Amino acid sequence: MALILAVTSAVMFVLGLCFGSLTVQDEGDFLAVRYGPLPLFVKRIAYSSITAVSPGRSTLLDGWGIHHFPAAAGSSTSGAATA
């Protein structure tokens, strides 16, 4: 039982490091999306493959967890415009 708890804790810790932040960056012909600070999940999207962009609106349920933390002050809040 202790081994299961230790392995689960280690996996959750690593996943926490993987999804601790989100960085969207212009890389010339590509848009890079990285979760970090441990960048295991990286996605590069070619600008030529983007066919349309439109503004959206978020609801309270879209990001309920981030609304309660001061570090998320720059994050989209309920009813706020999103990109």
Image (cartoon, rainbow, N blue to C red):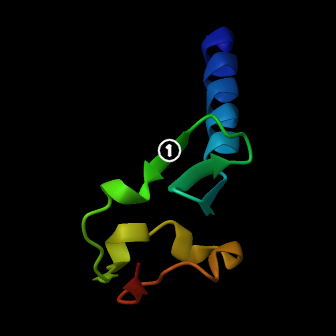
Residue located 40% across and 81% down the image: 82
| Dot 1 crowding, Cα within 10 Å, few <14, some 14–19, many 20+ | few
Residue located 63% across and 75% down the image: 72
Q: Give left or right: position of 21 versus 33.
A: right
Task: Work out whether residue 48 or residue 15 is closer to the camera in this orientation and state it.
Answer: 48
Residue located 50% across and 44% down the image: 43
Name the residue carrying label 1.
43
Q: Position of residue 13 (x, y in %)?
A: 69, 35
Quarter of the figure with residue 14? top right
Q: Give left or right: position of 42 versus 45.
A: right
Q: How many marks?
A: 1
33 vs 5: above or below: below
40 vs 65: above or below: above
Residue at the limit of the structure toward the bottom, as seen here? 80
25 vs 36: above or below: below
Residue located 25% across and 64% down the image: 51
Quarter holding the N terminus is: top right
Quarter holding the C terminus is: bottom left
Q: Position of residue 46 (x, y in %)?
A: 43, 52
Q: Give left or right: position of 67 versus 60.
A: right
- Label 1 secondary element: strand
Q: Position of residue 35 (x, y in %)?
A: 61, 49
Residue at the limit of the structure toward the right, as seen here? 37
12 vs 45: above or below: above
Task: Work out whether residue 9 or residue 26 is closer to the camera in this orientation and state it.
Answer: 26
Task: Work out whether residue 66 or residue 36 is closer to the camera in this orientation and state it.
Answer: 36
Q: Position of residue 24 (x, y in %)?
A: 58, 62
Query: At label 1, which amino acid type do we have?
Result: Lys
